[in-house]
Image (cartoon, rainbow, N blue to C red):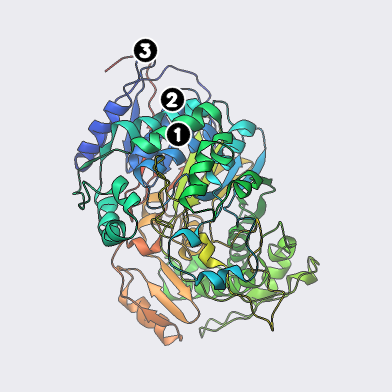
Amino acid sequence: MNARYGAVRRRRRTVVNLRTPLRMSLVALVIAALLAVPALALELETAQSVRSTQGVVTAAHPLAAAAGAEILAKGGNAVDAAIATAYALAVVEPHASNLGGEGYMVISLADGTEVAIDYRSRAPLHVNVHTPAETGWPPHGILTTLIPGMVKGTELALQKYGTMTLAEVLEPAIRLAEEGFPMGDLLASQIADAYESFLLEYPEAGKVFLDNMLIPEPGTIFRNPDLAHAMRLIAEHGSDVFYFGEIADAIEQATEGWVDKASLAAYRAYERDVVRGTYRGYEIVTAPPIVSGVRVVETLNILELFDLAQYGHPNHPTAAHIMAEALKITQADYNAYVWDPNFYRVPVEGLTSKLYARERAALISLDEAKRYEAGDPYAISPAGEVAFTPATVEESPSTTHVSVLDKDGNAVALTQTISSFWGSRIVVPGYGFLLSNHFRQFPGFEVDDPFRPDYAAPLKTTRTVLAPTILKKDGEVRLVIGSPGAARIPQTVVQTIVSIVDFGMDLETAIRTPKFHVSGLTLNLEGGWPAESAEALAALGHRVNTNYGELDLFFGGLNIIAVEDDGTMIGVGSFRRDGGASAPLVVEEAVVH
């Protein structure tokens, strides 16, 4: 990643053939069948890792990545492909994201346009500060649902920055839902984990995800015709059918009026300014508040003040210690200052300034692990809001991420979620999609603290840690990165950027390198972390926890694209989940297989 990316601009017809490892042969057969489009011969390469000059898509499932690559092969841009992939994930990874969920998208176009699309879920119109306590914070169910944002947000992005119609980009996902695909180990295991709940509490979910109310085996062909029906309605009528029409009626009925039609009609997705920063010569383009892009920039600003490369490897105890301390500092700032920008002014300028980073970095000792309080970014960027540390909310390792880079240099980093795996577990009958369970993240009202910025309110969103990010050099995209994993997301993204930029790792090595997650003085180390390093970190005062396996799902699921010096794009799907990468292949003549 040391030279400018030269976009390949040749236009050639493309055709469909699949090169995948033997272990993915069943998936390969299904991809080949699903992509047999009579009107256009397509050729894609789909595997855990691919190289291409024609564009790349990486996602949490190879079939979803292939859906996006199909759109690239048909002439769509990165925005078109990202949205196609997002909808395909609702089919093949339904436990992590769905039409009833939300997300955040960072778009960087070759013409210099940089924008973020905020489609976070929001509270219904009827809620107030007392509502969360009145619900009792159930882990799932009707009272955990919020107004979904995915359909509105993806439509906004497509209309403003895409080149294709909703019908065109939804076509691959609709085929997947109708014709089915072989269920992988991860989805089968997630269904098994939820089996008793689906069977006894949420029979509508059981009808969709169980095999005649039994746990499906890996390899079972899974179909969701109800979801295909919902997506066909959206393809034909746009988001209006979801927020005003028959799907809105069904959501209101499924939630017994908790998410009512008035609330759905009031929902808006937002275009927002991206958060920008720099790190060792790279330009950072990431998502603004209420998500964690600002924390990614602040952390990298702090780390830039240390010579990490001298330690040779990110698992070196001193390098890991510095990164952990920086992440603790920025967690304190994030907790204190990052709230819903529709309700509060967030001091983004202060939090992302190099001057503020220098002040915060001075707190780090190389000799001991410490706890940190929030700093004062208002001295840099007056904002008029008081700092506050919220209650801790338990987060699951859910969520999903998509990275796309097309042949013209347009890029999208998209992270979306339904909060916990399986979200609220409420499936909208007849439409086959799950609703999220984000409402449980609102705290209860406290009389002695009436002005907390995280109290529930109509159309307010909860804070989450999504961190879709793009790195550029000399204005050209060099890295598209993001991950699922709840609180691990910004930490995993930062560690991986450091592995690539500071330690010169190739993409696959950077992803496979064991990760850590720090919370207070507790330092969770992924399996494979060097024992001597773990001992040295414990000697510094970290409470080291090594009870994790290698490539553990807890530490996220990076889906990344990088660009080599000659302009070749490399995409790698997550090794910690069922990730895959896909790219159009170039041929001189169309060939139908």
Estimate the spatial distance between the alpha carbons at disc 3 and disc 2, rounded to whole Å: 14 Å
Residue type, numbered disc 3: Glu
The residue positioned 55% from the left and 68% from the top of the image is 307
Q: Is residue 79 left or right of residue 524?
A: right
Nearer mark to the viewer, of 3 and 2: 2
According to the picture, the residue beneath numbered tag 2 turns out to be 73
Question: Residue at position x 32%, y 72% from top?
Answer: 530
Q: Residue at x 67, y 37 (%)?
A: 112
Dot 1: what SS?
Answer: helix
Residue at coordinates 59% horizontally, 66% vertically from top-left? 299
Name the image quarter holding residue 110. top right
Report the amino acid beneath label 2.
Ala
Q: Nearer the viewer, residue 78 or 342?
A: 342
Q: Nearer the viewer, residue 53 or 127?
A: 127
Task: Return the x and y of residue 408 as percentages of the image width and height.
Answer: 55, 29
From the image, tell me which residue sits under label 3: 589
Mark 2 or mark 1: which is in front? Answer: 1
Q: Looking at the picture, how far across and down is residue 569, in whole percent?
A: 45, 38
Q: CA distance from mark 1 to mark 3?
A: 33 Å
Q: Is residue 153 above or below residue 310?
A: above
Local SS, label 2: helix
Amino acid on which disc 1 is placed? Met
Nearer to the camera, 189 or 407? 189
Q: Earlier in the sequence, mark 2 or mark 1?
A: 2
Residue 23, quarter of picture: top left
In the image: residue 73, left or right of residue 342: left
Say which residue label 1 marks: 231
* Residue 569 visible in the snapshot: no
- For the residue pair 95 and 302, the one nearer the viewer reads as 95
